[in-house]
Image (cartoon, rainbow, N blue to C red):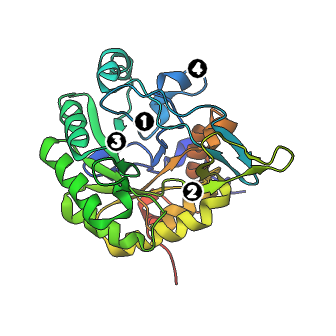
Amino acid sequence: MIQSKTAKELHPNLAVEIAGITLKNPVMPASGTFGYGEEYAPYLDLDRLGAIITKGLSLQPKAGNPTPRIAETTGGMLNAIGLQNVGVEAFIRHKMPYLREVNTPVIANFFGNTLEEYGEVARRLSDIPELAGVELNISCPNVKQGGIIFGTDPQAAHQAVSEVRKQLQKPLIVKLTPNVTDITVIARAVEEAGADAISCINTLTGMSIDVRTRKPRIANCTGGLSGPAIRPIAVRLVHQVVQAVKLPVIGVGGIMSAEDALEFLIVGAKAVQVGTANFIDPNAMATIIDGLEQFCIDNNISDIQQLIGSLEL
């Protein structure tokens, strides 16, 4: 009788590379769903993750929006946290000491409300040797240009990435919003401006009403929709971006299981980010990593690269 080999015997290779950053596996948290990393340490081994992506950072501390800021919806949730964070200087002083001890690449997500803010935060993050790279959130309004969202206009997106690129010596991942007519136009603009990788998608704008009070369920009225409900949209947009640019793409949106993650990898994403699942199960990413390994074993796949971009049309 022939016995099937165990995971320990096969050792499928899950390692991937994003913009020069080597990850032991393709799984990382989505920004804003994992705090600054340390908060989740009691629930899973941070060293198991492919990377840690921090909560978004701004030049100054930010209190965020009034509550309620989260509402559960069918197949997902709405959030309007308002990018609450401690600010880049407090992050450097109080959060980085812990992250320096973690045996996993750390990527700092950040944002600004003007080109100058983007550039200044990038400059300060560039000076932190322990950061493997940064992720730029361009889903923010430019307060100096009438509130236009940087990520919805190709020229504004190009300007933001160009400004950051001038100040930054580290790998630069740009996170794209899905709230546009054609995401490939924005993807090409950030590629031309100097991005090293792209993550997509950010949340979709949504709204939910309490029919008894006849009021929005979140104080901000609208919020970002995340969770399984958006996954098919995210997979489609990742597929389009992969076809449009030469940069590595990180897939984000409604990943709850290893099979969900595999959808993104098969359409060409080099890695994935897990968000809403972390609120349901703090150990979700470890379970997804185990599932990817088991899938490779069950299908005689020795290297995760054999799956990436293997879509058959």
Q: At numbered mark 2, what does the secondary structure look like: helix, strand or loop?
A: strand
N-terminal-most mark, 1 or 3:
1
Residue bearing mark 2: 205
Residue bearing mark 3: 111
Which residue type carries mark 3?
Phe
CB-based contact (under 8 Å), mark 2 and mark 4 = no
Q: Position of residue 203 (x, y in %)?
A: 53, 53
- Of tags 3 and 4, the one toward the viewer is 3
Residue bearing mark 4: 42
Give the spatial CA distance, label 2 vs label 1. Answer: 25 Å
N-terminal-most mark, 2 or 4:
4
Which of the two residues, 128 or 49, is positioned nearer the viewer here? 128
Q: Position of residue 284 (x, y in %)?
A: 63, 39
Most extreme residue toward the right is 212
Residue bearing mark 1: 52
Q: How many marks?
A: 4
- Of tags 2 and 1, the one toward the viewer is 2
Inspect this view and state whether residue 246 appears.
no
